[in-house]
């Protein structure tokens, strides 16, 4: 089976996208686990009398904010890394691909018209 360069690149891109999404979901899952672990730890510290309930709530709020800030930072860095990595491939944009497809269609119409002229001229 013959594959065009664009279909192969598109397939690789979908595979890469799926792997990145899977890695991202795994990362988010780890953040959720960390938050649950933090909540359990604070509950134990409150139960043992090492923290007051208000101190525990404040600590959890601080940790939750830190986790959210880290998640946003990580998301931003992943986006930047993906964009810079894809830019190195110098793949055409969707707009460029659409323009090339339109140009190929125009060329095909011209070839058909020229072929028809040859057939009509030969008759």
Image (cartoon, grey):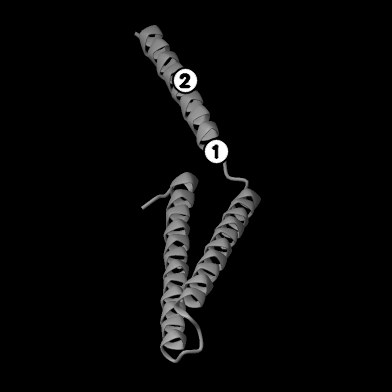
Q: Position of residue 7 (x, y in %)?
A: 43, 47
The picture places residue 120, in percent across and down from the top left corner, at: 36, 8
User: Label 1's element?
Assistant: loop
Give the CA distance from mark 2 to mark 1: 20 Å
Residue 78 percent coordinates (x, y): 57, 59
- Checking the image for residue 13, the label placed there is none
Residue with the most extreme bottom position: 48
* Contact (Cβ within 8 Å) of mark 2 with mark 1: no
Looking at the image, which is closer to me, 27 or 13?
A: 27
Q: Earlier in the sequence, mark 2 or mark 1?
A: 1
Which residue occupies the foreground of this view, 54 or 110?
54
Q: Establish if 101 lies above or below 71.
A: above
Between residues 101 and 32, which one lies in front from this camera angle? 32
Q: Residue at x 49, y 51 (%)?
A: 9
Relative to 54, is 5 above or below?
A: above
30 shown above or below 82: below
Rendering coords of residue 28 (x, y %): 45, 67
Query: Badge 2: few (under 14), some or many (20 or more) residues near its Cα, within 10 Å?
Result: few
Q: Nearer the viewer, mark 2 or mark 1?
A: 1
Q: Identify the mark at residue 106; answer none if there is no mark.
A: 2
Disc 2, SS: helix
Callout count: 2
**Residue 117 versus residue 105 in the image, above or below:** above
- For disc 1, the neighbor class at 10 Å (few under 14, some 14 to 19, many from 20) is few
User: Which residue lies under the disc numbered 1?
Assistant: 93
Closest to the observer, 104 or 23: 23
The image quadrant of residue 76 is bottom right
Q: Quadrant of residue 85?
A: bottom right
Quarter the C terminus occupies: top left
């Amino acid at each position: 089976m013959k594959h065009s360069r664009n279909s192969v690149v598109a397939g690789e891109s979908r595979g890469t996208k799926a792997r990145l999404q899977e890695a991202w979901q795994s990362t988010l899952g780890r953040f959720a686990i960390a938050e649950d672990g933090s909540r359990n730890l604070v509950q134990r510290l409150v139960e043992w009398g090492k923290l007051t309930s208000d101190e525990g709530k404040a600590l959890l709020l601080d940790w939750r904010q830190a986790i959210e800030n880290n998640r946003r930072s990580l998301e931003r860095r992943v986006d930047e890394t993906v964009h810079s990595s894809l830019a190195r491939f110098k793949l055409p944009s969707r707009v460029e691909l659409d323009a090339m497809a339109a140009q190929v269609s125009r060329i095909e119409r011209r070839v058909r018209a020229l072929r028809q002229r040859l057939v009509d001229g030969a008759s």
